[in-house]
Amino acid sequence: MRGIAYGIGVGPGDPELMTLKAVRLIRECDVIAVPGKSPKEAVAYKIARAAVPEMDSKALVSVNMPMIKDRALIDLEHRKAAKLLEGILDEGKNIAYITLGDPTVYCTFSYIQHIMETDGYELQLISGVPSFCAAAARLGVSLAEWNEPLHILPAVHRLEDDLRLSGNYVLMKSASGMSTVKARLKESGREVGMVENCGMENERVYHGVDEIPDDAGYFSLIIAKEPKTRE
């Protein structure tokens, strides 16, 4: 019988934020799949390893997920990754594909999932704490209250609306265009906080646009809240 592939969210950085289900399945699965060329150097692996040291005895598989913009080449790599994992499942082994945050939010596993499901393989997604929830908790703010809308944007791709919609914003993937993002945030007049490397040893917290450095790291998440009106 074929095995099952689990897309497992390991949370944003703090191993203590991993779910009991994630820990159990990582322990039970035969193979651990990790995005990147060097599995043991991957952030997701280091997080999971801190909570599940038994991973040292597991078979590790590297899944190439290049950070490129060529859609044709990306699709080719995704298909290669799917075939790699399908070969393992055909051996009757279960796979834990570990990923940062939650596997349903801007996750590379989604692309592999679509291919493998089309090919007739069984996959299950295991929720993890999303980075924006952990960042909001770290900042001590709510993401949304009462009837406030919440907008989640990959800022590197979508910031054309100038943050004009009512409600609060989560800006993910902001680092590569941080100077532009900061300019838009200033124009919006919103209350801004950012967490860099949330839950990790090198975590940094910023309050206000002016505190945010232009060279912030890849794992930087911004929360921009609509100012409260006082009646």
Image (tube, rainbow, N blue to C red):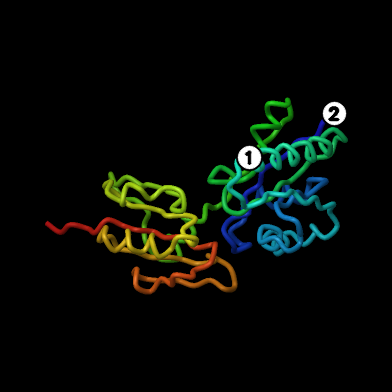
Q: Amino acid at mark 2?
A: Met
Q: Quarter-wise, where is residue 224 in the image?
A: bottom left
Give the camera-side residue of 184 and 122.
Answer: 184
Q: Secondary structure at mark 1?
A: strand
Farthest residue to the right: give it: 91
How far separated are the C-alphas under marks 1 and 2? 20 Å
Horizontal side, residue 65 vs residue 58: left or right: left
User: Can you identify the residue that label 2 sits on?
Assistant: 1
Disc assigned to residue 108: none
Q: Residue at x 29, y 49 (%)?
A: 167
Give the camera-side residue of 33 and 62.
Answer: 62
Percent coordinates x, y for residue 154 in the rendering: 46, 50
User: Can you identify the residue that label 1 sits on?
Assistant: 125
Q: Marks 2 and 1: in contact by CB < 8 Å?
A: no
Horizontal side, residue 136 vs residue 146: left or right: right
Mark 1 vs 2, N-terminal side: 2
Q: Residue at x 31, y 57 (%)?
A: 225
Q: Amino acid at mark 1?
A: Leu
Q: Secondary structure at mark 2?
A: loop
Q: Residue at x 34, y 68 (%)?
A: 209
